[in-house]
Image (spheres, rainbow, N blue to C red):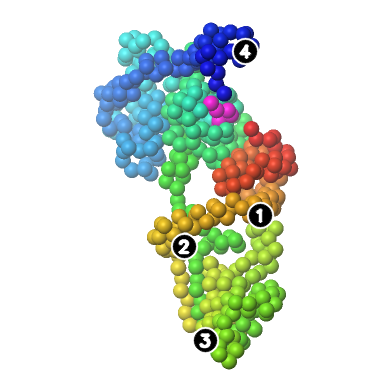
Amino acid sequence: MKAGRNDPCSCGSGKKYKHCCLAADTAPDPADLEWRRLRQLLDGQPVRLLRFADETFGKAALAEAWEDFTGSIEGPFDPETPHIGVFMPWFYFNWRAEPTDAHVEPVVAGGPTVAGAYLQKKGGQLDPRERRYLEAVIDAPFSFHEVVTCQPGRGFVLRDILTGAEHDVTEHMGSANAQRADILFAKIVALDGLAVLDGCSPVLIPPDGKGPILDLRRRMRSRGELFAAELLKAHEYDLLDIYYDLAEAILNPAPPELRNTDGDPLCFHKIVYDIDSPQAAFDALKGLTLGADDEELLADAERDAAGALHKAEFSWHRRGNRIHKHWNNTILGRIAIEGARLTVEVNSEKRAQKFQSLAKKLLKGQARYRTTTIESTETMLERATEDSETARIRDREQEELAAQPEVQALLAQELNAHYENWVTEKIPALGGKTPLQAVKDPEGREMVEALLTQQERDARRNFPMPLETLFQRLRARLGLPTSG
């Protein structure tokens, strides 16, 4: 609890808090004061640089730079682009007009950057500190920086993933929602003992986005390249390509490709047959339940007035699971018999084909194929979201169910089994290696750490039970340090 002004000071001096440590506790952070002074000094600088670029490089320069920045895949420059926070600083401080840029003034083609030309022409008129800041930004390279520790609203310690250099960065907005292991694409500019961000990505890249950055680092190391500012500048377009792909995946995510538990694309099939006898069809297909007895399968069945079977429903099972090795069986579909009609519902084309092949063998002429109705995942989702009230009720019921201790115990058991199996699975993001294999080399170990951090975040967000013990055990098995 925060001490009141007239409370005894917690330092033990015996004085009131207001006469002792209050002034020190409420004194502004020197780095924060320097940051505010710098921001005030730089106020209006982007507008001045843009005006100078138009006058000196020509109005077409911005469009030429945008093509270079995006690789000509984005279309004409749009001031509303979410990449504006990276692109404009890159345009001012990094982009150089090529002699082949026909619409750029010849006097600057192949010459300095916009900021460099600005300093040459106007540097003598600038405040000395602003001039030194511009020089520092020109010298600083773009890179990918990982959050080591964070003080939201004040700043963070960032580690350059490519060079390993660490900086204590003062940054108010960018640190507000950051977490350990998040990744930023930005320049870190050092001036008078203060480190600040310039040209920062509009999104925090999650830990599992680290793969292509580590791939670039691996390629650079394989060539024996040294990790210095000039080297990062030499790989500037490689870095921009990686940034653009990672940011676009977050800003404009592609619809997820939904798959069933066998890994097949979801596509719902309803297969209909005409049958001669409900009982004969039941007897032929009941073996697909993996040994359940008739009494259990027919507990909810309906019979006609003569006592003959009229309606029954049961699941189609298969032993084990190709992806989830700890599963005892997999539900492949739902079989419904009613009168002269047999209906089978499955969630993939592959399972539909498999059942039709089985039907020929098991039903032996007792059933005649009638039709198949196919419904895409997108259509089902659209239909499911039409009734928002029903969705809210369902979500509330699921939350109440998940809060029950016995359900949480079952979820914990399933999660434990999943992650115990995960460490021995071949993971595409690890180049087809298992986590246990990948941790044996530095880049692989770093990527396993990133994937595990992301999985830990996702699990804490999606499951309502404590998970610390589970992930501590998993980290111990992989030889990774306990997360902070």
* Residue located at (66% from left, 40% from top): 468
Residues in magenta?
146-151
For marks 2 and 1, give the CA distance: 32 Å
Mark closer to the chain start, 1 or 4: 4
For marks 4 and 3, give the CA distance: 86 Å
| Mark 4, residue position | 11
Q: Is residue 330 left or right of residue 390?
A: right
Type of amino acid under label 1: Glu
Mark closer to the chain start, 2 or 1: 2
Mark closer to the chain start, 4 or 2: 4
Image: 21 above or below 162 = above
| Mark 2, residue position | 377
Q: Which x, y percent locates residue 466?
A: 64, 43
Q: Within 10 Å of the Cα at label 4, are there few (<14), some (14-19), or many (20+) other Cα atoms?
A: few
Type of amino acid under label 3: Ala
| Mark 3, residue position | 340
Type of amino acid under label 2: Thr
Residue 35, located in which quarter of the rendered image?
top left
Mark closer to the chain start, 4 or 3: 4
Q: Is residue 260 left or right of residue 33?
A: right
Q: Within 10 Å of the Cα at label 3, are there few (<14), some (14-19), or many (20+) other Cα atoms?
A: some
